[in-house]
Image: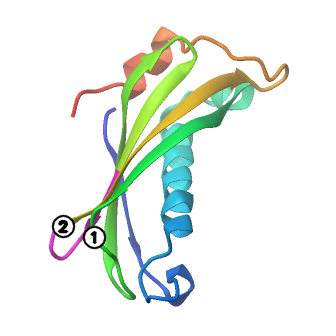
Amino acid sequence: MGVYTKTLKVVQDDLDDLEHVNNVRYVQWMQDIAKEHWKAKAPKELVEETVWVVLTHHITYKNAAKLDDEIVLKTYIEKSRGAISTRVVEMFNKETDQLLVKAKTEWCLLNSKTLKPMRIAAEIVSVFVQNP
């Protein structure tokens, strides 16, 4: 319940022309950790019956990450209402605990067969929503 965390190490393919982690890579990591969190915590039948789609991303880049940095990614659901869930992702330099990126993404829950929005059930809220 609550915060889901993972650690990764920056590799050469993550870097841009300035030798910093590319902004596109941060977005990929945001999507990856959201998907991992969902699959790790959601009941199997919900994973099979639903799909999440992104409505908006708001990303604040605070500091740069570089080759071989270890990054701690933390994610949690800030709130949910109707079919919309707001997920926060924060990324920190593991060595310095310096905040690198903070992002909020609005996700919409869809029925996987009809692709129509569906209300986020109480069972989902009870597993995921927490005020960190």
Q: In front: 61, or 11?
A: 61
Q: Position of residue 106 (x, y in %)?
A: 51, 32
Residue furthest left as drawn = 96
Residue 75 occupies quadrant: top left
Residue 44 occupies quadrant: top right
Colour scheme employed for the rendering of this structure: rainbow
Dot 1: element:
loop
Q: In front: 25, or 37?
A: 25
* Residue 95 belongs to the span the image colors magenta: yes
Residue furthest right as drawn = 113
Q: Residue at x 66, y 35 (%)?
A: 53
Mark 1 or mark 2, which is nearer to you?
Answer: 1
Asked if the residue under mark 2 is in contact with the one under mark 1, i.e. CB atoms within 8 Å, the reply is: yes
In the image, residue 41 sits, relative to residue 62, either above or below, namely above
Q: Position of residue 100 (x, y in %)?
A: 29, 65
Residues packed near mark 1 inside 10 Å, few (<14), some (14 to 19) or many (20 plus): some
Q: Residue at x 50, y 67 (%)?
A: 23
User: What residue is pinned by disc 2?
Assistant: 98
> What numbered label is drawn on residue 63?
1
Number of numbered markers: 2
In the image, residue 57 sits, relative to residue 48, either above or below, namely below
Real-space CA distance between mark 1 and mark 2, rounded to the nearest whole angstrom: 8 Å
Dot 2: element:
loop
Q: Position of residue 55 (x, y in %)?
A: 60, 34
Q: In front: 59, or 89?
A: 59
